Image (spheres, helix red, strand yellow):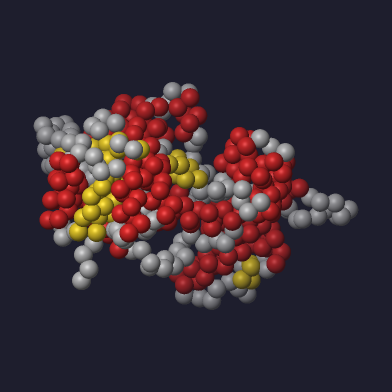
Amino acid sequence: MTRQRALIVDDEPDIRELLEITLGRMKLDTRSARNVKEAREWLAKEPFDLCLTDMRLPDGTGLELVQHILQRHPQVPVAMITAYGSLDTAINALKAGAFDFLTKPVDLGRLRELVAAALRLRGADGEELPVDSRLLGDSPPMQTLRKQILKLARSQAPVYISGESGSGKELVAHLIHEQGSRSEHPFVPVNCGAIPTELMESEFFGHKKGSFTGAIEDKQGLFQAANGGTLFLDEVADLPLPMQVKLLRAIQEKAVRAVGGQQELVVDVRILCATHKDLAGEVATERFRQDLYYRLNVIELRVPALRERREDIALLADSMLKRLAEGSGISAAKLDEDALEKLKSYRFPGNVRELENMLERAYTLCEDDRITASDLRLADCSPSSENGESNLAQIDNLEDHLEIIERKLIMQALEETRWNRTAAAQRLGLSFRSMRYRLKKLGID
């Protein structure tokens, strides 16, 4: 059986030797390079399963090597080695596409964990992942979202998942976890807004018996429960400021101390978080700590609202109705054309969750396994009025209508310029900065 191979890039001989010995004991073959030039030469000659690179190299930086590998060898996970305390450097590496990072002096236990995780990820290459039945949709925003999930699953970077209530943020977090190297370890979701303030520290970090009234036995915290896996902080904007300070320290130090405990416990947890609030706005109003915001928001992933992908409604509705039929043991109901048009013209402030609730109610009320427009119990929002003029109730407001037109024109310009953003901006008469803002606002990658 062919041994897996790692490329070690560092200009310090003692670091290279330490990494070679440790990886050798893990049954890996290693190749060493002293600089970016030598690393590129090795990459051109041999296939690798992993690359470990120092940040500062004599002829360049580790970030340059990360970018080179992403472009030429995207299947190879890259871990960055940074100086102790260089958190900004490590975050920049994760943003650039690094799998994970280590700090000097290198902790050998942490190194072995990182290497094992990277190799698990590498071993999954080439496996075709089916479209998850929980994340349906063929619209451009959903195709983009699936690609982003796959990309983020190959990283250990903290991800901030933004989106409206009911759009599926927890599902997206689940998929990032399941398709990544931590899939065999726990996924622990927590609604930060549902924990009483006085119990937060105990819930997150655990407590020792007798540490406070009611602590009748030792209790494991959420960080310990998620050790080796993923901790998903839903509605993270609801955390009170004192808890934000403690959470920041736990993330930075990768260690927690139980309430009433004397020793810190090292934990290996990937953090994913979400909120329906504007987290940057919460920072601006000083309701959320800026340092924690930057630590959590290494990469932002936006989940599109249902009204931004109306073409997916028919597919979603069909899947939901089949699931309802399976649960009830009777035949599946079908949507009449008028009912489907009603759904496509509705704004869906509650997104996918609202669609599911609406169909469940209609499924219960309908007759002869046919769901009509009246079964949906929506206000009249037909496409045209009696005098033949367009009825904008289907858009709900002017902003929605303009956003649909804007998206259509931008997508057309991008396709005509083969996704050259600069050329597309010129064709639309926009500055590149304005184009970049609009792409982010519309969730177009």
Q: 250 or 220, which is in the foreground? A: 250
Going by the picture, which residue comes out furthest to the right?
A: 387
Image point (41%, 68%), residue name: 128
Q: In this figure, what is the number of numbered marks?
A: 0
Q: Which x, y percent locates residue 433?
A: 61, 34
Residue at (20% x, 39% y) in the render? 12
Residue 345's quadrant in the figure? bottom right
Foreground of the two, 143 or 103: 103
Is residue 41 visible in the rendered structure shown here?
yes
**Residue nearest the viewer, comparing 398 with 85:** 85
Against 140, residue 62 (above or below) is above
For residue 369, side relative to residue 38 (left or right): right
Q: Is residue 8 above or below residue 49?
A: above
Percent of width and height locating residue 373: 68, 62
Asked if residue 206 can be seen in this view, the reply is no
Q: Position of residue 412 (x, y in %)?
A: 69, 52
Q: In the shown orientation, is residue 43 left or right of residue 169?
A: left
The residue lying at 66 percent from left, 45 percent from top is 423
| Residue under the image location 81 percent in, 51 percent down | 390
Q: Residue furthest top?
A: 286
**Image quadrant of residue 56?**
top left
The quadrant of the picture occupied by the N terminus is bottom left
For this view, does 404 lie left or right of residue 267?
Answer: right
Question: Based on the displayed image, in which of its 4 quarters is residue 248 positioned?
Answer: top left
Please, is residue 90 above or below residue 228 in the view? above
Q: Position of residue 369 (x, y in %)?
A: 60, 73
